[in-house]
Image (tube, rainbow, N blue to C red):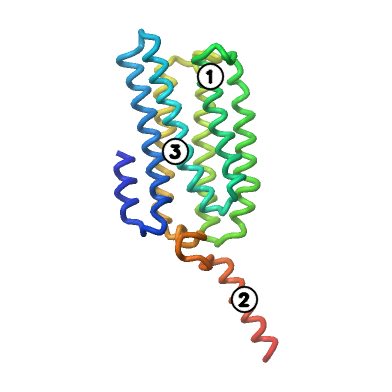
C-alpha cells in the first residue's frame, strides 16, 4: 500500500525532481520485499534450509534498498556530498549485513551483532553532525525538513538495532514471532512517516542544485536581499 501511494505521488512531481520521488518509492518497495521474505519464511519455509536462507537474503536486500532510498533523499535535501552520504549508508548497511552474516553463516560469530549499537552511535554522529552542519548552509525550509527526517531515521534505525540485540539468536530476550511483529511495526512507522514528510514538503526538491532551478536556495536569496538592503542604507 505504501509503495503504491508513494508511486502515485511520485508521478505528480515535476520530471526534473522525480528521481527523489523514485528514491522515496524505492524505500517503500524495499520494505515490501523484506516483508514478503519474512512472511514467506514464517508460513512456508520454516522447516527447510536453503529456501530459508534465500528468503532471509531477500529480507536483507529489501532492508538495504529501503535505507538506500532514505539516505539518498536525506542527503539530497541536506546538500551532503557523496562521500558523506556514502559514509552514512555504509554504516547502516554494514550493521544490516553484519547481522545477516552472523545469523545465517558460519563466517561471523553470532554475538558480533552486539556491536550494532556502536554502529548506531557512529551513524547518529554522521547524521546529527556533518549532515546537519551541511543542511544549515541551505534554505530554512530544507533544514526544517532535514530535522524532521533525521529524527525519523534514527528512531527507525534504533528500532531495528534493538530488535537485533534482543533477537533469539543474540540475547534471546524475545521469540522469533515477537521480533518480526515488532520490526514490522517499527518499519511501517519509519517508511510511512518518511513518505509523508517527503511528499508534504516536496517543494524543497526545487531548491536542490541539478533540479533545473539552480540558484533558488532561499537562504542565499535572503542573504543577497539583506546585503542589497544594507548597501542601499549606506548610500542613503
Q: Earlier in the sequence, mark 1 or mark 3?
A: 1
Percent across and percent down for residue 25 are: 37, 43
Asked which secondary structure carries label 3, the reply is helix
For this orientation, the residue located farthest to the right is 234
The residue shown at (48%, 37%) is: 67
Q: Which mark is residue 63?
A: none
Q: CA distance from mark 1 to mark 2?
A: 55 Å
Disc on res. 226: 2
Mark 3 is surrounded, within 10 Å at the Cα level, by few (under 14), some (14 to 19) or many (20 or more) other residues, namely: many
What is the quadrant of the C terminus in the image?
Answer: bottom right
Q: Residue at x 55, y 62 (%)?
A: 139
Q: Is residue 95 above or below residue 193?
A: above
Mark closer to the chain start, 1 or 2 = 1
Which tag is nearer the camera, tag 1 or tag 3? 1
The residue shown at (40%, 25%) is: 58
Q: Quadrant of the N terminus?
A: top left
Q: Which mark identifies residue 190? A: 3
Q: Which mark is residue 101?
A: 1
Question: Residue 235 location, x and y as percent?
Answer: 68, 90
Image height of 210 relative to 2, above or below: below
List x then y, in percent, for residue 37. 36, 23
Helix, strand or loop status at disc 1:
helix
Amino acid at each position: 500500500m505504501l509503495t503504491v501511494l508513494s508511486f502515485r505521488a511520485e508521478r505528480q512531481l515535476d520530471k526534473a525532481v522525480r528521481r527523489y520521488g523514485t528514491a522515496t518509492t524505492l524505500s517503500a518497495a524495499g520494505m515490501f520485499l523484506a516483508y514478503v521474505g519474512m512472511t514467506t519464511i514464517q508460513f512456508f519455509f520454516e522447516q527447510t534450509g536453503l529456501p530459508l536462507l534465500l528468503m532471509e537474503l531477500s529480507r536483507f536486500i529489501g532492508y538495504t534498498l529501503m535505507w538506500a532510498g532514505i539516505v539518498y533523499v536525506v542527503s539530497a535535501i541536506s546538500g551532503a556530498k557523496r562521500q558523506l552520504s556514502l559514509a552514512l549508508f555504509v554504516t547502516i548497511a554494514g550493521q544490516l549485513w553484519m547481522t545477516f552474516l552472523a545469523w545465517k553463516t558460519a563466517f561471523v560469530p553470532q554475538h558480533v551483532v552486539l556491536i550494532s549499537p556502536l554502529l548506531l552511535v557512529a551513524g547518529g554522529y554522521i547524521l546529527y553532525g556533518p549532515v546537519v552542519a551541511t543542511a544549515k548552509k541551505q534554505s530554512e525550509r530544507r533544514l526544517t525538513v532535514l530535522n524532521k527526517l533525521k529524527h525519523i531515521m534514527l528512531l527507525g534505525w534504533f528500532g531495528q538495532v534493538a530488535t537485533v540485540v534482543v533477537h533469539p539468536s543474540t540475547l534471546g530476550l524475545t521469540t522469533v514471532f515477537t521480533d518480526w511483529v515488532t520490526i514490522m511495526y517499527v518499519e511501517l512507522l519509519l517508511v510511512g512517516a518518511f513518505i509523508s514528510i517527503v511528499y508534504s514538503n516536496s517543494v524543497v526538491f526545487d531548491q536542490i542544485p541539478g533540479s533545473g532551478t539552480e540558484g533558488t536556495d532561499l537562504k542565499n536569496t535572503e542573504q543577497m536581499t539583506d546585503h542589497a538592503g544594507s548597501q542601499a542604507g549606506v548610500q542613503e
